[in-house]
Each structure stands twice: as C-alpha cells, then as structure tokens.
Amino acid sequence: MTSIPRLPRRGLYGLTPDQFGDTEQLVARVLAAIKGGAALMQYRDKPASMAARESRARALIAACHPRGIPLIVNDAVQLAAEVGAAGVHIGRDDGDLAAARALLGPARIIGVSCYDSLERARDAVAGGADYVAFGSVYASSTKPRAVRCPLETLRQAASDLPVPIVAIGGITAENAGPLLAAGVGLLAVIGALFDSADVEAGARAFAAPFSSVHHS
C-alpha cells in the first residue's frame, strides 16, 4: 500500500471542477496537472452521488499518491476515511474539526476554509488544522457571490500562523504574484487549471510566479 504523501508548504493546489462527468478523463486531466507541477490535489464534486464520488476518489488516489501528490477530499470526512485519502477539506457547514480529526487520525491532512476571518483561522490552527484557506481573493466564476478576502488578511495570517496559508478564488498565473508576496504558500486553482485546453501547460504557468518570490 502506498504511504500517504505529506502536505507541501508551497505550490499549486489543483481543485477538480464539479460535475466533471467522465472519471477516466478526470484522472487524465489531474495527471496532466501533476505533470505540469501541481503539488496538491483536491477532489470536489458536490452534485455527484456518493457511489460516484467514492469511485472517482479511489481512482484519483491511485493516480496521485504513488506520484507523491496528496489527494484531499472536499467536505466528506467519512468518504475521505473510507477511501484512504490524504485528508479532507472542511468548510463552515461540513462538520466539526475535532470530529474529523478523531475519525481520520493524526497523520491525515485537514484543511479548513476561513473565508476572510483571521479569528476562524486561529481557532482552526488551535484545533489542529494542517492548513487554512482564505478567499475568494479575486472575483471567482466558480463562486461569484463568495465573500472577498483582502490581501492584508493573508499577510497577517502568514505572519501569525505556523501552518501553510492557502488562497482561493479567481487566481491565475498572472495575478498570483501579490498573493505569494503576502506569504501565501498554496494557490488553490480550479478554472485557470481545468478550464484550460492544455491542463499541463496551465499548471506549468504557475511555476513562474512561485520562482519569482524568494523565501528565506
């Protein structure tokens, strides 16, 4: 059995689009993202049946974990535990962090959506979250009504918190620079990656903003 890959502190965090349809094609596009440099992947597909989600999650784990890329399941803690995912990402309505940790154990990754709230992020870290996510940082076609998170909040979170900071929402290779300069470690991307005709090239484009920001 392949061991669970560790959470990277920096890199492109690819999120699969909802209602993708064909599992084989989804896996192929995820593999292309990994080939292009994605460091972390999340499977999110809220409209699909639980049976379909389980099947796709297992297929994605088989593609990601042997390549050293953690596969995170969005919002379904029980599913993440059952399929052997690297971890789970939970939002405001996805259950309790302590309960998720109790079910998944100490070695799995738990990420928490914090929207624009430093207080929520501090509470999540105190409760054992492995990373905290903020956004939408830019206007997002995936969640057009999402609360917006200012750059200063990201800067403060990166300064105050010991875990990787994730930014999400409308991020492209062209607008990523200010987020990385503010201390964001992981860029969570859906559209700019999976809407691309060439997913590998879409992922590779994010190498430039990462390489231009130097961390001591």
Image (cartoon, grey):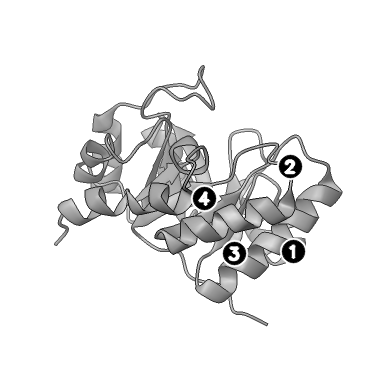
Numbered label attached to residue 127: none
* Residue 65 x, y percent position in the rendering: 58, 71
Q: Amino acid at mark 1?
A: Val
Compare residues 28 and 63 and report the one nearer the observer: 28
Q: Residue tagged by mark 4?
A: 111
Which image quadrant is residue 58 in? Answer: bottom right
- The first of marks 3 and 2 along the sequence is 2
Q: Amino acid at mark 2?
A: Gly
Q: Is residue 105 visible?
A: no
Q: Image point 50% across, 39% down: which residue? A: 190
Task: Tell me the quarter of the image containing the C terminus.
Answer: bottom left
Q: Residue tagged by mark 3?
A: 86
Q: Secondary structure at mark 2?
A: loop
Which image quadrant is residue 192 in? Answer: top left
**Mark 3–mark 4 distance (CA, rounded to whole Å):** 11 Å
Circle 3 or circle 2, nearest the eye: 2
**Mark 4–mark 1 distance (CA, rounded to whole Å):** 17 Å
Q: Residue tagged by mark 1?
A: 83
**Mark 1–mark 3 distance (CA, rounded to whole Å):** 9 Å
* Residue 112 x, y percent position in the rendering: 52, 45
Q: Residue tagged by mark 2?
A: 21
Classify residue 214 as left or right of residue 58: left
* Residue 5 x, y percent position in the rendering: 52, 72
| Picture layout, residue 110 above or below residue 146 | below
Q: Image point 36% across, 26% down: which residue? A: 138
Q: Amino acid at mark 4?
A: Gly
